[in-house]
């Protein structure tokens, strides 16, 4: 046998061995099976209720590995920057292609595992992604970045918690901050369930940031920062969710918890200006690319707020900036000493069916107009 023939045989054997690393076509557990939101690239026909009609998955399942996805792909080769450093042979769970949707069941909710899946989804322009994080408590002080289009992250039963005695906290989830302006950072994103726990003693950053994004749903999540003792002047909390330059955002059936051990209790859900000015940068440095994109069509509904000075809204904006079509319905506010809803240059606002318990006033109106309550 000549040397050339030996090389050919070795190449064939190596290819076979590499193929054996592709995960088996495991099925999702019954309680993990959910309908996939029909997320189209052209979202102009979508209503403000980002849930839309549900589209069933179907039965014809194809092993996603046949579509060219390899679980042993090194994350460093990904175009999506995620600051993940992992071994190339680490397993990332089972994936299936069902119609045009990749259904991905992760083995755990550790930072590297979740970010790997989110980065793969952001880089795949052909498929929609449903990513399931298993139940459990995961300790992390890193930031998961969600960019791209057509991604559902199901975290029901999972809790993400800060390490003990962390001095500098990071944002847990950041959606859409990838250097793109307008609403091109992220589109058609849905986060379902899960708890973001800021722990007891950290100086909080925001738990979630959404910037330059369109058609984002945050549903059934729990956000909390409940320190057991007063934290002093440096122990102020950030916001649970902070947004800038977004449109068609739905925050539904979420719970927000805070207490008086923080030096300041900011709005649980804050809407920030995206104007490039020193004043606005000082208010929020994490707003990403500042091109003046405005916020519109945001709905906060059926949520529960406890322990904040302000429930949601904004008490400042850049000059000449106006947020339009803002909806606050059927929420419950407990202990909002100042205002449940803050409005600063809002236009076309709907406030209806909200319940107040031991609160100051329902809303604060600063330069806002066309309010329906």
Image (tube, grey):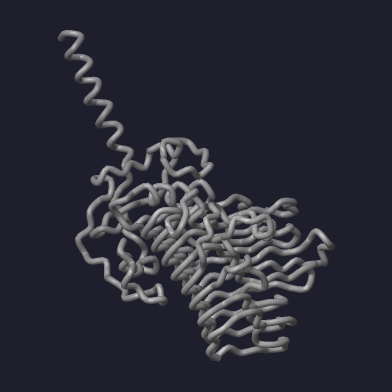
Report whether residue 252 is seen: no
For residue 204, side relative to residue 160 (left or right): right
| The C terminus sits in image quarter | bottom right
Residue 47 placement: quadrant: bottom left
- For image coordinates 46% across by 65% down, the residue present is 191
- For image coordinates 48% across by 78% down, the residue present is 325
The spot of residue 296 in percent (x, y) is 49, 71
Q: In the depicted view, which residue is nearer to us: 118 or 246?
A: 246
Q: In the depicted view, which residue is nearer to us: 10 or 156?
A: 156
Residue 35 placement: quadrant: bottom left
The spot of residue 178 in percent (x, y) is 49, 49
How many badges with numbers are in the image? 0
Task: Look at the picture and state if 356 lies above or below 129.
Answer: below
| The N terminus sits in image quarter | top left
Q: In the depicted view, which residue is nearer to us: 179 or 257?
A: 179
Which residue ends up furthest to the front in the rendered image? 320
Report whether residue 265 is seen: yes
For residue 306, side relative to residue 296 (left or right): right
Task: Look at the picture and state if 73 lies above or below 258.
Answer: above
- For image coordinates 53% across by 79% down, the residue present is 347
Which residue ends up furthest to the top in the rendered image? 2
The spot of residue 38 in percent (x, y) is 30, 68
The spot of residue 148 in percent (x, y) is 40, 53
């Amino acid at each position: 046998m000549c040397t050339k023939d030996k090389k050919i045989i070795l190449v064939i054997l190596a290819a076979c061995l590499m193929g054996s690393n592709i995960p088996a076509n495991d099925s999702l557990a019954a309680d993990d099976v959910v309908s996939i939101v029909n997320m189209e690239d052209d979202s102009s026909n979508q209503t403000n209720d980002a849930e839309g009609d549900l589209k069933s998955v179907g039965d014809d399942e194809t092993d996603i590995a046949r579509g060219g996805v390899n679980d042993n792909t090194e994350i460093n080769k990904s175009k999506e920057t995620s600051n993940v450093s992992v071994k190339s042979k680490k397993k990332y769970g089972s994936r299936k292609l069902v119609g045009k949707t990749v259904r991905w069941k992760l083995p755990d909710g550790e930072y590297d595992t979740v970010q790997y899946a989110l980065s793969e989804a952001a880089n795949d322009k052909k498929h929609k992604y449903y990513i399931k994080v298993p139940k459990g408590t995961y300790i992390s002080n890193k930031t998961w970045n969600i960019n791209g289009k057509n991604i559902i992250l199901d975290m029901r039963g999972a809790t993400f918690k800060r390490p003990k005695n962390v001095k500098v906290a990071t944002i847990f989830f950041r959606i859409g901050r990838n250097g793109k302006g307008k609403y091109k950072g992220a589109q058609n994103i849905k986060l379902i369930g899960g708890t973001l726990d800021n722990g007891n003693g950290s100086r909080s950053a925001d738990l979630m940031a959404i910037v330059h994004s369109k058609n984002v749903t945050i549903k059934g999540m729990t956000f909390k920062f409940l320190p057991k003792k007063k934290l002093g002047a440096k122990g102020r909390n950030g916001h649970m969710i902070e947004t800038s330059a977004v449109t068609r955002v739905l925050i539904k059936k979420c719970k927000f918890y805070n207490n008086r051990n923080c030096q300041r209790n900011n709005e649980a859900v804050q809407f920030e200006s995206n104007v490039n000015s020193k004043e606005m940068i000082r208010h929020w440095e994490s707003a990403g690319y500042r091109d003046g994109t405005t916020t519109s069509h945001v709905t906060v509904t059926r949520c529960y707020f406890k322990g904040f000075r302000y429930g949601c809204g904004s008490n400042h904006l850049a000059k000449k900036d106006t947020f339009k079509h803002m909806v606050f319905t059927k929420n419950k506010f407990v202990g909002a000493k100042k205002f449940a809803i803050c409005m600063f240059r809002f236009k076309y606002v709907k406030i209806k069916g909200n319940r107040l318990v031991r609160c100051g006033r329902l809303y604060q109106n600063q330069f806002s107009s066309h309010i329906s309550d």
